[in-house]
């Protein structure tokens, strides 16, 4: 329904009227001009407002929760100290490795989900008609309707004229037949009187 002015739409969308004009030019909002006032389709404005106000999903890196610092006990024996230190390093590296593997799995799942969404969006876009093509087809349809209506009106005018001419011819034929009958009656009367 075309019931919003440019200024009302700009106030609703929280943009300038020039931005509304750009939306109209890019076929995002349908418009209809009534004298000098441009009215906008409220459904398109509401859809654009909904689209602008939806929060887009953003993938943010999670903060690291594990802290890989370990305390080492000092042991007098140097060989045992080296073994303990290497064990601490090995356990810390194992934990880091498992945490990184878990992060990679989570990110792989996110990538798979996003690729499925992209694939679905591509399928929808591939199977849909662009707005420009839709507007062109609507325009062609309107033109064909107008030309069809003009042809129908011309044919109805021709039909009325032909029916009027037919009535005129019928009337002329009836008058001609009556005149012939009258002439025949007069000539018959003259013939009978002369005999």
Image (spheres, helix red, strand yellow):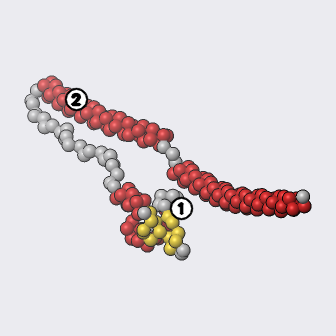
Q: Reply above or below: 75 against 29.
A: above
Q: Which residue is found at the position 22% from the left and 29% from the top?
A: 94
Locate residue 71, reporting x and y percent.
13, 37
Q: Which part of the image, by quadrant, shows the N terminus?
A: bottom left
Task: Determine which residue is flagged by label 2.
Answer: 94
Locate residue 66, reporting x and y percent.
19, 40
Q: Which residue occupies the foreground of this view, 187 or 56?
A: 187
The residue carrying pointer 1 sits among few (fewer than 14), some (14 to 19) or many (20 or more) residues within 10 Å by Cα, namely few
Q: Which residue occupies the foreground of this view, 21 or 83?
A: 21
Q: Is residue 95 visible?
A: yes
Task: Determine which residue is flagged by label 1.
Answer: 25
Locate residue 73, reporting x and y percent.
10, 34
Q: Which residue is found at the position 29% from the left and 33% from the top?
A: 105
Dot label at residue 117: none
Q: Reply above or below: 117 against 134.
A: above
Circle 2 sits in a helix, a strand or a loop, which is it?
helix
Locate residue 135, reporting x and y percent.
54, 54
Say whether residue 172 is left or right of residue 52.
right
Q: Which part of the image, by quadrant, shows the C terminus?
A: bottom right
Q: Is residue 52 visible?
A: no
Q: Does label 1 or label 2 sit earlier along the sequence?
A: 1
């Amino acid at each position: 329904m075309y019931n919003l002015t440019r200024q009302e739409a700009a106030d609703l969308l929280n943009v300038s009227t020039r931005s509304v004009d750009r939306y109209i030019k890019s076929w995002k909002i349908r418009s209809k001009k009534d004298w000098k006032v441009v009215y906008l389709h409220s459904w398109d404005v509401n859809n654009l407002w909904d689209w602008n106000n939806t929060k887009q999903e953003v993938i943010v890196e999670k903060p690291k929760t594990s802290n890989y610092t370990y305390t080492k006990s000092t042991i007098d024996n140097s060989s045992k100290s080296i073994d303990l230190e290497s064990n601490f390093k090995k356990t810390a590296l194992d934990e880091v490795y498992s945490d990184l593997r878990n992060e990679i799995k989570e990110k792989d799942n996110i990538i798979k989900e996003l690729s499925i969404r992209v694939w679905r969006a591509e399928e929808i876009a591939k199977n849909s008609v662009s707005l420009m093509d839709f507007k062109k087809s609507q325009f062609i349809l309107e033109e064909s309707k107008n030309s069809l209506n003009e042809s129908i009106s011309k044919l109805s005018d021709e039909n009325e004229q032909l029916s009027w001419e037919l009535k005129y011819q019928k009337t002329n034929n009836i008058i001609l037949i009556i005149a012939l009958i009258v002439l025949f009656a007069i000539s018959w009367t003259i013939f009978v009187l002369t005999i």
